[in-house]
Amino acid sequence: MNLTYGADPEFFAATEKHGVISPALLIEENKIRIEEYDEKHPVFYKDDRFSWMMDGVAFEITLLQPHENPENIYYTIKDALKTLRSILNGVTFEDYPIKIETLPAIRIRPEIYQEKLANPMIFQGFIFGCDEDFDAIEMNYEGNTIDVFNHEWRYGAGHIHVGTDSEEFLNKLADRAELDKMIQLAAIYAGNTAIAFSSNPKLDRQRTFHYGRPGRFRPQDWGFEYRTPSNLWTKSLKTTKKIFEAVAKAVESYENNMWKELTDNFLEETIKNILDADKKGARKLLAQLP
């Protein structure tokens, strides 16, 4: 079965004084330009390979073409970041220069935004869960919108997309019980890999406050989106290869009917490794996997 891959990682504009600066704030102050208006996800740039849009207080890349090679994903993201740097070149907030941060969690100062929340774009930065997702491990999870005005952190995702043209595989995943099995295997392989190679486990652990939970996913017509990893895998070619090799191994294990064996032996430990951002534990577990 042939697999294709994609991603929609998030990055932050920030200053040394203010922490994260929402794209919506820069729009309101006429410091960056919108190409396509949308109240939730305005687009700043789009070509045939990728687009940049706003998601909450983050700048989010969407890769517009499926890839068979993780190396192509890494270099497309690298090119996209060059574009974002160009968009933000010379932009300041209260005379502080803007820099781009690749972090699982970043602080926000709500008081900067308090008088501007009537602006629906700015308000998007003060809710979590504006687009529904699901959980294959915390079965009672409901992807509801929650108010986070008084929460001092915002979170950077590195969602993994897995697609295929195999109708047989897609038909299996149309059954929620089967999709849950697939995502649990993704947690064992890709979730542990994200933690094992994390360059900032402290912030990866902070991200599990709401996002970054071990079983988070979103079903897609072309396959599935595993939403647990943060954006840190985007920082190197090595970690990009590792994360996509891991999710491919998860699919292979699912296809080889290894779900029960692997979840019986490794799921409980996987949950602990991800929630604690335990690099040592994740590496130890990965060394035991087939």
Image (cartoon, rainbow, N blue to C red):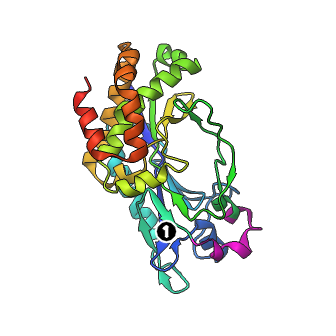
Q: Is residue 235 left or right of residue 206?
A: left
Which quadrant holds residue 31? Answer: bottom right
Judge by depth and name the residue closer to the eye, 287 or 254: 287
Of the 4 image quadrants, the one containing the C terminus is top left
Stretch of the chain drawn in magenta: 109-122
Crowding at dot 1, Cα within 10 Å, few <14 / some 14-19 / many 20+, comes out as many
Of the 4 image quadrants, the one containing the N terminus is top left
Disc 1 residue type (three-letter): Ala
Against 103, residue 285 (above or below) is above
Q: Residue at x 56, y 31 (%)?
A: 220
Q: Is residue 3 magenta?
A: no
Residue most toward the bottom?
95
Q: Residue at x 64, y 77 (%)?
A: 29
Residue 28 appears anywhere in the view? yes
Measuring from the top left, give residue 83's x and y in whole percent.
43, 63
Measuring from the top left, give residue 153's x and y in whole percent.
54, 62
Against 249, residue 96 (above or below) is below
Q: Is residue 174 left or right of residue 100?
A: right
What secondary structure is marked by label 1? strand
Q: Residue at x 63, y 67 (%)?
A: 24
Residue topped by disc 1 = 13
Measuring from the top left, give residue 86's x and y in whole percent.
44, 69
Residue 164 appears anywhere in the view? no
Residue most toward the right?
118
Against 283, residue 74 (above or below) is below
Q: Residue at x 35, y 53 (%)?
A: 201
Q: Main secondary structure of the magenta part?
A: helix
